[in-house]
């Protein structure tokens, strides 16, 4: 983390400031805030998550399906330019490693006072949306509120119940609430797919560590509960972005540019007997992916990874009235920003402050030049955090492979640039560098490789082409 300019510890001013914060924030203005503590709010997150950023609730009102997303009001405690805020602005994101989380905000806040914890009254910003029969979502309202999480749930348990009827010991009203949310989320997914949103399935690995030893790596599987939350959060992000834009407010947009390596995506499709247009077309790519998922399901994870690598990474930019219409290519969205995780991501906290300044008729809290600088840093630090996380996963993977030097594997090329060529073996699904025989290979190619070197400390896993 130090090599990447990420602070692993909190400086003395942060600790001193934190000692003065003893209770959660209370509603700021009774006339503006809404008391919504009686709703059946639930949180659905990872099994071990303690920093709860959002709650969800759904109901049918006057014949219309309505979903509510409550976002933790972090700004109510973490004030702009405070010592805690300056630390958050330095890292801009929480860093998740195999053995430890380095939260953007101190755990006293992110896991407690600004977290939407179970059975705890908390300040929030609520995004209220109506959902049409076809899954189209529209903002009904957005406002500050007082909420209470009625059930802290985990993805795997909720998905087990939704997908396989595995018992979920919850009160019947909450089970009904989950069924309603799931049905709405599937409609939103269908609508988003129709608009051109790309559907991927990738393999992510998580080391299992016992007594400081890596015993295996497990695949992370995206399930129906993940998709439920993903669809609600995307809808909320779009609605908040459009709301601020309609009021001519600046927006910290999240974009994925039109892919520069589209020609390679066209080539991959041609190898599979399909044709894509010569110019980037998100709906054509969506249809191609849907076909491949159906006819080659056993290879879809690998194809997904190849195309994700070729699409390129997301970035943060300042969006303002009259500016260029930069969008998110793989979500097929023009209006998009991150707003739903202010405990974990600094851009979301910035967006929350912009939104709240509009609620209360206050001056915009950031100058244009500040937002441009913040957007650039958030992009850089997110990239740094990803590199730290990947390196430590590779360190763990190297521990598992240290006794397998000399073995041969089938591998797919996952990266090819001037910086190096990378491959991922299939069993176990671990990525490493191709140091010999990388000429004339490109992303998506399948080759046979031999493991030739493992460096646990630096997370280096080196292969050569056979």
Image (cartoon, helix red, strand yellow):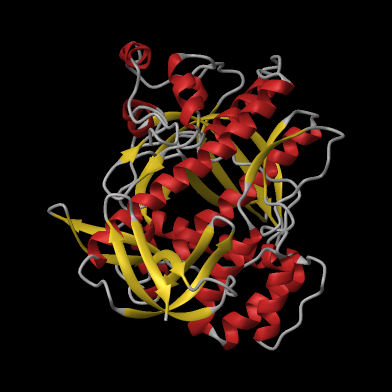
Q: Is residue 403 left or right of residue 48?
A: left
Q: Camera-side residue: 421 or 93? A: 421
> Can residue 88 be seen in the rendering of this structure?
yes
Q: Camera-side residue: 385 or 198? A: 385
Marker count (numbered): 0
**Where is residue 39 drawn, in percent x and y?**
47, 41
Q: Is residue 142 left or right of residue 82?
A: right
**Where is residue 80 drawn, in percent x and y?**
54, 17
- The residue located at (32%, 70%) in the rendering is 452
Does residue 193 sit above or below 212 in this rendering? below
**Where is residue 62 drawn, in percent x and y?**
67, 51
Q: Quadrant of residue 463?
A: bottom left
Q: From the image, which quarter does the N terminus lie in?
A: top left
Q: From the image, which quarter does the C terminus lie in?
A: bottom left
Does residue 106 sit above or below 297 in this rendering? above
- The residue located at (52%, 44%) in the rendering is 383
**Where is residue 106 drawn, in percent x and y?**
35, 27
Q: Is residue 201 left or right of residue 62?
A: left
- The residue located at (48%, 19%) in the rendering is 86
Does residue 416 sit above or below 145 in this rendering? below
Q: Quadrant of residue 139?
A: top right
Does residue 16 sit above or below 37 in this rendering? above
């Amino acid at each position: 983390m130090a090599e990447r300019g990420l602070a692993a510890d909190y400086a003395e001013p942060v600790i001193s400031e934190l000692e003065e914060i003893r209770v959660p924030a209370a509603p700021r203005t009774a006339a503006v805030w809404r008391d919504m503590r009686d709703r059946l709010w639930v949180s659905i997150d990872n099994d071990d998550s303690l920093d709860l950023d959002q709650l969800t609730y759904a109901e049918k009102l006057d014949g219309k399906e309505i979903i509510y997303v409550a976002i933790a009001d972090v700004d109510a405690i973490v004030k702009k330019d405070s010592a805690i805020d300056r630390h958050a602005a330095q890292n801009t994101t929480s860093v998740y490693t195999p053995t430890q989380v380095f939260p953007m905000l101190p755990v006293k806040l992110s896991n407690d006072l600004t977290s939407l914890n179970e059975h705890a009254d908390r300040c929030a910003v609520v995004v209220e949306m109506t959902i049409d029969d076809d899954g189209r979502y529209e903002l009904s309202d957005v406002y500050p509120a007082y909420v209470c999480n009625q059930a802290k749930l985990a993805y795997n348990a909720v998905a087990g119940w939704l997908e396989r009827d595995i018992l979920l010991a919850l009160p019947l009203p909450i089970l009904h609430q989950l069924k309603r949310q799931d049905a709405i989320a599937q409609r939103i997914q269908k609508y988003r797919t129709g608009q051109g949103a790309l559907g991927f399935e990738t393999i992510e690995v998580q080391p299992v560590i016992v007594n400081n030893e890596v015993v295996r790596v497990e695949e992370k599987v995206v399930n129906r509960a993940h998709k439920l939350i993903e669809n609600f959060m995307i809808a909320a992000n779009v609605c908040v972005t459009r709301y601020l834009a309609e009021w001519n407010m600046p927006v910290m947009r999240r974009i994925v540019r039109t892919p520069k390596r589209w020609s390679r995506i066209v080539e991959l499709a041609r190898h599979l007997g399909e044709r894509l247009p010569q110019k980037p077309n998100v709906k054509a790519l969506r249809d191609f992916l849907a076909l491949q998922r159906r006819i080659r399901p056993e290879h879809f994870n690998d194809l997904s990874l190849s195309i994700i690598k070729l699409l390129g990474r997301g970035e943060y930019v300042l969006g303002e009235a009259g500016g260029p219409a930069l969008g998110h290519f793989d979500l097929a969205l023009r209006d998009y920003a991150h707003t739903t995780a202010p405990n974990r991501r600094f851009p979301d906290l910035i967006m929350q402050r912009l939104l709240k300044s509009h609620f209360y008729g206050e001056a915009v809290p950031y100058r244009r030049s500040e937002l441009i600088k913040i957007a650039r840093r958030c992009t850089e630090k997110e990239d740094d955090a990803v590199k730290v996380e990947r390196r430590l996963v590779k360190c763990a993977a190297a521990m598992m492979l240290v006794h397998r030097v000399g073995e041969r594997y089938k591998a797919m090329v996952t990266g090819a640039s001037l910086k190096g060529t990378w491959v991922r073996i299939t069993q176990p699904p671990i990525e490493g560098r191709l140091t010999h025989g990388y000429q004339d290979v490109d992303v998506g190619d399948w080759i046979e490789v031999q493991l030739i070197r493992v460096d646990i400390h630096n997370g280096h896993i080196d292969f050569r082409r056979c």
